[in-house]
């Protein structure tokens, strides 16, 4: 490099620090004007304060927390039978049956992480006493898994059980909208309607079990021809009782003579889920039913606030594990901007994505993003999170983000991106960029050379691109 101009130019600046992918992704999307987000919705009148709701959640899961802490200290699983269960019962003053129930709830609420035969405290357990969000999220996770915490009758048809579980959100919505006790016959009527709708959506038309001729002389199709037995008319009332008992067992509602009422905690949880549906319906882009890739592409032109609303809506419509896996699949693709946006969406997921993100940190292409995510999750200041990256990782992320700008941004953004590198001088940056081995290095350098107004600097960048392309030094 013969010109000193790049060094002289950068010498006038202080040591430059890496800008977080969040800010860079936002820069690449800046062509769209800001959109105002909806004001924060208020819960229904009479809903207890968040601290009181958290206290109720902690009360429901009190035994589960005790068992989880005992198991985490003992580092062993509390199985359905065996010495661990007996030792836990003796140590905690509970019956073996109470231990079994509490252990199941601890797992369903995400209080423990099980690695083989080893138990570790989950993030919710570590933050249980000081973080109301941890308590509320743990309880909502238990509510979502109520059918596992309270197994269905053994003689119930699995298909009928699945239909009832799928229809329960509508039952809960009726209870929430009624703002008081609802008679069981009214709940049963709603359940029957919803199950009928589900069967109609699957084109399951009920037929008589016999094969008598129809009015036109053609034989009727029996249950054997439709792929299963005719529905048991007595199944739904019994399964409704099971569902109400299960929801009551996790603290979502109370049961009285022939009626059910949501608890304050259950009322709040149903309102939150209904609000999430409203967010999905009113989201700026409306990608709730799209794949993760299509959803993220739809968010490229959104500013951060509306984009986060879109992420929340999309996540609320699917199981967390499936959503996280789909986002990471997109992050492994070729589009660098989608990679950054995928980790932005994972920030909305929060601690539930920690295990998967920690595993992704072992993949070279995802490692810088994952390390930044983990640093922020562990409480690091977002402006200082980049300190967890090695020089090589920071350089790789600089190239990856530049590739996102090349694909989706404007030339002036790429020029400004030069100032976000960790290296103090352009020669130092180019030397390390050549060594980092990013697959888009040549394209990034060529685009930067074409966009930069300084002829001497552009020449140096073109030379570096040629060296990477030919394998020279």
Image (cartoon, rainbow, N blue to C red):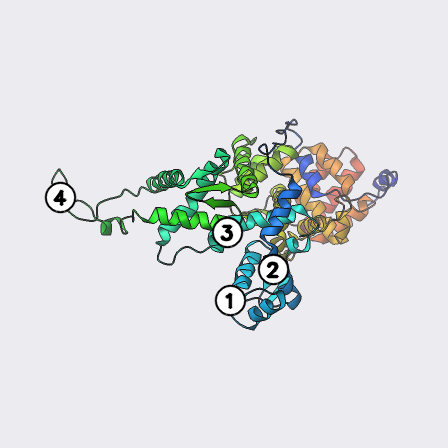
Question: Label 1, label 3: how many angstroms apart (C-alpha)?
Answer: 19 Å
**What kind of element bears circle 2?**
strand
**Closer to us: mark 3 or mark 4?**
3
Eyeballing the image, is 373 above or below 217? below
Q: Is residue 241 toward the left or the right of residue 253 in the image?
A: left
Q: Which residue is mark 3?
A: 249
Dot placed on the residue nearer the N-terminal end, 1 or 2? 1
Look at the numbered disc 1 and give the secondary structure of its residue. Answer: loop
Q: In this figure, what is the number of numbered marks?
A: 4
State the residue at coordinates (35%, 57%): 155
Residue most extreme to the left:
217
Residue 277 image offset from top left, x and y in percent: 52, 36
Q: Are marks 4 and 2 in contact (CB under 8 Å)?
A: no
What secondary structure is found at the residue carrying circle 3? Answer: helix
Q: Nearer the viewer, residue 164 or 346?
A: 164
Q: Residue at x 47, y 40 (%)?
A: 172
The label shown at residue 72 is: none
What residue would you read off at disc 2? 113
Tell me which numbered mark, 3 or 4, is placed earlier along the sequence. Answer: 4
Q: Earlier in the sequence, mark 4 or mark 1?
A: 1
Instruction: Please state if 11 lies on the left or on the right of 220 as rendered.
Output: right
Q: Is residue 198 above or below residue 92?
A: above
Look at mark 1 in the image and give the residue it sits on.
80
């Amino acid at each position: 490099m013969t010109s000193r101009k790049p060094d002289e130019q950068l010498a006038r600046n202080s040591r430059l620090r890496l800008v977080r992918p969040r800010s860079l992704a936002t820069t690449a999307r800046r062509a769209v004007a800001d959109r105002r987000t909806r004001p924060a919705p208020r819960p229904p009148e009479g809903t207890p304060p968040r601290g009181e709701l958290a206290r109720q959640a902690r009360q429901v899961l009190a035994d589960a927390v005790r068992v989880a802490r005992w198991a985490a200290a003992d580092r062993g699983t509390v199985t359905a039978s065996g010495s661990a269960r007996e030792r836990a019962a003796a140590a905690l003053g509970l019956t073996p049956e109470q231990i079994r129930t509490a252990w199941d709830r601890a797992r369903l609420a995400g209080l423990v992480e099980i690695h083989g035969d080893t138990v570790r405290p989950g993030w919710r357990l570590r933050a249980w006493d000081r973080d109301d969000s941890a308590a509320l999220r743990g309880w909502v996770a238990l509510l979502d898994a109520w059918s596992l915490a309270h197994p269905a009758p053994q003689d119930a048809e699995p298909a009928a059980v699945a239909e009832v579980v799928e229809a329960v959100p509508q039952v809960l919505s009726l209870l929430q909208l009624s703002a008081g006790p609802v008679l069981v016959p009214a709940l049963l009527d709603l359940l029957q309607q919803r199950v009928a709708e589900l069967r109609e959506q699957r084109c399951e038309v009920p037929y008589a079990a016999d094969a008598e001729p129809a009015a036109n002389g053609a034989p009727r199709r029996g249950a054997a021809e439709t792929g299963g037995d005719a529905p048991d008319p007595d199944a739904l009332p019994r399964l409704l009782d099971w569902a109400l008992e299960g929801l009551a067992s996790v603290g979502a509602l109370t049961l009285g003579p022939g009626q059910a009422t949501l608890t304050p905690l259950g009322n709040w949880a149903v309102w939150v889920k209904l609000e999430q549906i409203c967010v999905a319906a009113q989201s700026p882009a409306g990608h709730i039913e799209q794949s993760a890739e299509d959803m993220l592409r739809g968010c490229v032109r959104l500013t951060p606030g509306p984009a986060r609303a879109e992420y929340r809506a999309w996540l609320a419509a699917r199981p967390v594990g499936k959503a996280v896996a789909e986002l990471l699949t997109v992050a492994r693709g070729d589009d660098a901007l989608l990679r950054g946006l995928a980790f932005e969406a994972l920030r909305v997921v929060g601690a539930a994505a920690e295990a998967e993100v920690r595993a992704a940190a072992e993949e070279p292409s995802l490692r810088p993003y994952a390390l930044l995510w983990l640093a922020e999750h562990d409480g690091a200041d977002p402006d200082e999170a980049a300190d967890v990256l090695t020089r090589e990782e920071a350089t790789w992320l600089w190239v990856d983000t530049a590739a996102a700008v090349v694909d989706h941004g404007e030339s002036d953004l790429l020029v400004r991106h030069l100032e976000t590198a960790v290296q103090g001088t352009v020669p130092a940056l180019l030397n390390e960029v050549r060594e980092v081995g990013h697959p888009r290095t040549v394209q990034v350098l060529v685009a930067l050379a074409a966009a930069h107004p300084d002829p001497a600097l552009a020449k140096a960048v073109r030379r570096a691109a040629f060296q990477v392309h030919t394998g020279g030094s």
